[in-house]
Amino acid sequence: MGGVVSSYLDEGKREIITERTRAVMVAFAPLYEQQYAVALFNHVRFDIEGGGGGPQAQLLHRKVPLENKSIFSGSLSQHLENKKWRSRFLLVPDSYTISLYDSKAAYDRRLQPRGSVHCAGYTVLSSVEEYLELCSNILPGTDALDGGPPSLKGPGRFPLLLWHPYARHLLFTAASQEEQSSWLAVLQDCVRHANDGLSEEDKVQTPAFTDAVRLYRQAQGHYGTWEMMCGGAAQILCNLVMEDLLPELRELISPRLKGKPHERLRHWMLVRDAVYSLVQGQCQAHYEAVVQKCEAASSSLEASIRTDMDQIITAKDHVTNKIREVVLPKAEKLLKVSIQPYISSVLDALMEPTSRGFSEVRQLFFRELVDLSKNTLNQGSKEVVAQHMEKISVLAFHPVKMQSCYEKVEPLSLEGLQQRFDVCSPSVFVQRAQILMRQHMDHAVYTFEQILHQTLEPQGPNELCQSIQRCQDRVMKKFDFDSSSVRKRFFREALLQIFTPYMLKQLRPCCASELPRFQELIFEDFSRFILVENIFEEVVLHSIMKDITMAVKEAALQRRHHLYRDSVVLSSSDSALQLLGGPAPIDWAAEAGAPREELGGAGGDAQRRRRVKQVVSMIQVEGSPVLCVEGPEEPGQNRVPVEVQSAPAKEEEGGGGASQWMEEEPPSNQEVSEEACPPPEELLSGAPESLPGATTEAPRPPQGDSGFLSPTCEG
């Protein structure tokens, strides 16, 4: 772990870390096993009975959103542990895990990256002052850093800082404000995606895990939302451990830290990152063992569930009625006094920014379709349509274009209600709304792709424009309907997350003594699938669900924020649309008539390489300052798996153009001549900072639209 870290983390400290981690996992494991059986029962029951659900979605859903795509790549200057700055080439693939290379040439030669960054739990900052303010609260005695250590004053004036409460921080600078804005949007998108690390497709493990974490935290006295419920399962468990372990270690280690305030802070952050990595590895091993144990028993559990399904349901209904008789009167009294007066105000706080965000998504989608119609009218051909559709197909995953939509939701505030209802931060709901916006945009784009592709035939510009207009009208109706359904579901879920923990916290003390006697009503064979604690929470949830549903329904009846009534059904909905979505994505490059040799390997031989199209392009303007000014890297430096270190390297000619093809296989040793790229004046027309819809006076050329790449350059 290095000399600094090992001097503070001796064997005694490591034993404390292992012991605290084991204690958390010993308490978590039985909760997960219990919730796994309950989640498996609910899943099998849903498969047999089906769910009521809600209104049927009108838009098609893409199965693999970013197949053969990368998000972003470019060069930044990074601050290293030796207080120097080095140039780094950053690649953001479709997994949103950032890879850092010494240079673009190192990536092209398929060298190993210096490190990778999983962004879950990080906060992206563009101000050194904000970063230092957060750092001043990490360690006692470092409240005032007087402008921070001199090494933070990098070669560029446009910082990009990734802050984490437990893991190592990453400090970058960009060459210009435009690059800083683009990277800020990309990094925030990486954080947003990584925070949503639990798969919604897994109907057993995910609900079992989230319920087990919630019950564990409730046993510790924490009932509200939790900001560190982000990332994968192992990382969430690691956050659980670090919540109590870190203050204990800080009390033991901070008196031994020496030097100036910023040196003591730097050493403590190195120790903290080492502890975080150690705990995460131990949590991963413990969790995999628990999951393996549950998976091994799942077959026998499912067989028992399917055999005794009717009896289990009857027994559960009987126990539920008994618990409802005890809990419901107290819950209704609490609901009337402490919840009902606040439902409408909290709903208003949620509806305003969320609806503005979805409205901005609609406008962005509409502007792109208008541009498509203009380009088709001026240069009407099937190839022009396909060329433009290749860019629109990844619109939802274009962080720079979508940034204006995401910013509409960020003013969401629950001022005055956070302490009362134990809401840690509104960022939990902001990020959830932003993820739903991105999903909704992708559903709309995918539906438009499928409908338009069915109607493309050799025809004139006017006929093509009419076909596009008909497809646009058809999709926009479905967009509005699904937007209303998605937002209403989000409002209901958010209100439940705010109010249900508060009610549980108030009701559990007065009901705890009466709940154990209901366990006697459950047959021993069914006790794995019927838990009194879960039924108690279901009763509380259903008691408040009626008022929440009514509040959202009233908002829809008043047509507030363009919400549809529940009774509204699209008259234009067609079942044939569901047959359009195929497993293979539409190859718009082939539709545009791209020569096959462009997609093949060097020389057009049989060794064809799959090329990964990049969603956002980094604009490198001639004459821009070179940030890295340091000499070659010292050979004694160690490679760190999360924080990364490298030597500067010159960018290849044309490597920073507006259009790049990202290869999955390394090029051969024989050099391949590059095709001529457009001059900088043409590249600037495709900058990602120029958002769509900035002007409507004249149609833009298909290849000059925002930051999407057109097949103009080969690396």
Image: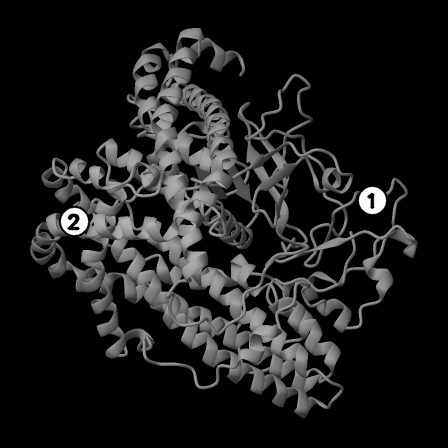
User: How is the protein colored in the picture?
Assistant: one colour
Quadrant location of residue 52?
Answer: bottom left
- Nearest the eye: 284 or 209: 209
Q: Say which residue label 2 marks.
A: 322
Task: Give the image location of residue 219, x and y in percent.
Answer: 24, 32
Mark 2, Cα crowd under 10 Å, few <14 / some 14-19 / many 20+, is few
- Nearest the eye: 80 or 622: 80
In the rendered view, would you say 449 is above or below 20? below
Task: Give the image location of residue 585, x and y in percent.
Answer: 67, 64
Task: Give the image location of residue 135, x and y in percent.
Answer: 36, 31
Mark 1, Cα crowd under 10 Å, few <14 / some 14-19 / many 20+, is some
Tally of numbered tags: 2
Query: Residue at 49% across / 50% down in the picture?
Result: 184
Q: Say which residue label 1 marks.
A: 667
Query: Residue at 57% across / 83% down in the picture?
Result: 471
In the rendered view, would you say 116 is above or below 392? above
From mark 1 to mark 2, how far is it between C-alphas? Answer: 70 Å
Q: N-terminal of the two: label 1 or label 2?
A: 2
Residue type indicated by callout 2: Lys
- Nearest the eye: 432 or 629: 432
Q: Nearer the viewer, mark 1 or mark 2?
A: 2
Q: Secondary structure at mark 1?
A: loop
Say whether marks 1 and 2 touch (CB < 8 Å): no
Whether residue 416 appears in this view of the structure is no
Whether residue 662 appears in this view of the structure is yes
